[in-house]
Image (spheres, rainbow, N blue to C red):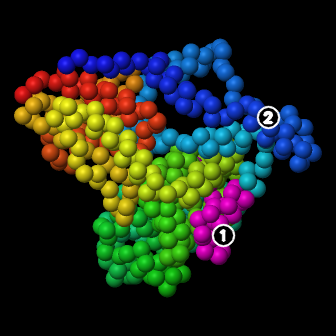
Amino acid sequence: MGSKFAWSRRTFLTALGAITGGLVAPTESRAASAAFGKKHKMSSHTDGHPIVPITSGLGSTGDIYAELGVTPLVNINGTVTVIGGSVMKPEVMELIRRGNEHFVLIDELEVAAGKFIAKLCKSPAGYTGLVTSGAAAAMVVGYAGMMTEDLEPRMVAIPDVSTFPRTEVIIQKSHRYAFDHQIRQTGAKLIEVETREEMIAAINPKTLAIHFTNILSDKGKVSGAETVEIAKAHNLYTFNDAAADVPPKERLWEYAEMGFDMVAFSGGKDIRGPQAAGVLIGKEKLIHYALLNMSPQEDRIGRCCKVGKETIFGMLKALELFVNEDLNTMLKIYDERAQVITDAVKKFGVTALPREFNPQALGNVTPRYSWKIDPSKLKITGQEVMQQLADTRPIGIGSMGAGASGMRGRDPNAPAGGDHREHHSQRDPNTFGFAVWQIKEGEDKMIANRLVEIFSQAPKA
C-alpha cells in the first residue's frame, strides 16, 4: 500500500507557525502598553517589545533546531524533564513576554506572587507561596530555610551544618528516591524508618523534620495524616514532595489543609508552566526563610536556584489556567486526538484498546491510549512500532527512554557486561501506546500519517 505521508521539517514548522503566529497581535500589544502607560503616567515606550521577525543570525531560517543540529520531538512520552517537560499555553507565553517589559525587585515580586498563589490555591490562613526553579529547587531552599531560619551566619555556612541545632530529617525507607539528593545537598542527614513506632523512636533533639514522598504514599506504613500528627506532637516540620501529583487540581490545597508545613509542586508538568519552575506552598515564616536562602540573595545555597521575573509571571498564569480548567473537557479533547489515530490505522487491522486513566492515581495522572496489532495480518511488534516512531526524522515522535541521550554515569563497580538499558513493565508484544495530551494541534494527524507509513511498510503475516 502506498503512503501519502510527506514528512518535512519545514512544512511541520510552517503548520505550527500558522497555529501560533497570530497569538500575540502587535496592535493588541501596543494597545495594552498604551493603556498601562496612561494608567501609571509612564511613557508608552518600555523595555519590552512585541514579537518581531528575526531576519539574521540564529532563528532567521525559521528552524532553530536545524540550525543547532538537534532533533525536535513530538511529545508522546508525557511531561518528563529529559525531553523538556510540557508545552506552555499561549497565554503563559504572553505573560512571560510582558514580564520582560520592566525591571522589578525580585523579592517584592516573589512575595506578591506568593499571595496570589495562596489565594488561587485556597491555602489555609498563615500560608503563602513561592515560585521556585522547579520542585527539586523547592526542596533545597525549603530545607535550607528550616535549618537556617533567618540567621545570616547559618545561611552563609550551609551546607556545613555542623554547628546547627537541628539537622536530621526522618524519612520512610520506602520513600527514599532520586530527589532526596536535594535534601542531602543542604547538609541535612536522612534517618530511615519503616514503621510508626520507629518514626517516633527516631525523634531526638537533632530532628528537624519528617519528609513525605507523596507519589510513594502507598509504599509506606505511615500515611500523610499520621506523619503530620506525629510531627505536630513533637514540634517538627513536615515537607510533602508532590511534584508530579496534580491533577486533580484539588491536591494543590488538600495537602496544606492536611497540615503539611511545606508542599512542593512541579510547574512544568501538568500545570504546563515554564519547565524550570515550581511552586512551594507553606507557612509564611518558612517561605520567608526559603526565600532568604535563594536567589536573588547572594552567598546562599539557593543562589543557583534563580527565578526570573518572566518565569514568575508565566508560572502564575499557568497555575491560574490549570486551576480553572475542566478536566472532563480536556479528556474529550484527548479522546478526539486518539480517535484520529484510530481511524487512520484500523484499515491495517490495528484496533484501539480502552483508554487507561485513573484520576486518583498518586502521580502523573494522565490518560494513556493503546492500540493492538493483529499478528495474523502484520509481522511487527508494538516495541518496533514505538522504535520507528522515535527514529522518525527530521522530527522524532517520542523517545525510547531517559537514557537515549547517553547521559548516564559509569559505575566502575558494576559487573562486566551488565545490562544498563531501560527496563519497562511487560506488556502484550502486539500492543503499543502513548500519551496524547502533550501533542499540539495537528500533531495527531502527523502521528497518524507516520503510523500509516510504518504499517504500510511492515511485513505481512
Tell me the SS state at disc 1: helix
Task: Please state which amino acid type lies under the numbered disc 1.
Answer: Glu
Q: x, y percentage for residue 25?
A: 70, 32
326 with respect to 123 (left or right):
left
Q: Tell me the tag on residue 284.
A: 1
Task: Please state which amino acid type lies under the numbered disc 2.
Answer: Arg
Q: x, y percentage for residue 291?
A: 66, 58
**Looking at the rendering, which quadrant does residue 147 occupy?**
bottom right
**Looking at the rendering, which quadrant does residue 117 occupy?**
bottom right
Tell me the SS state at disc 2: helix
The residue that appears at 69% across and 29% down in the rendered structure is 51
Q: Around disc 1, counting alpha carbons within 10 Å, would you say few (fewer than 14), some (14 to 19), or many (20 or more)?
A: many
The residue that appears at 42% across and 47% down in the rendered structure is 333
Looking at the picture, tell me which residue is in the foreground, 207 or 108: 108
Q: Tell me the tag on residue 30.
A: 2
Q: Which residues are magenta?
A: 110-139
| Alpha carbon separation for disc pair 1 and 2 | 38 Å
Residue 346 seen in the current view: yes
Instruction: Judge whether 43 appears above or below 240 on screen.
Output: above
Q: x, y percentage for residue 435?
A: 35, 44
The residue that appears at 65% across and 76% down in the rendered structure is 125
Quadrant where the N terminus sits is top left
Q: Around disc 2, counting alpha carbons within 10 Å, would you say few (fewer than 14), some (14 to 19), or many (20 or more)?
A: some
Q: Is residue 156 magenta?
A: no
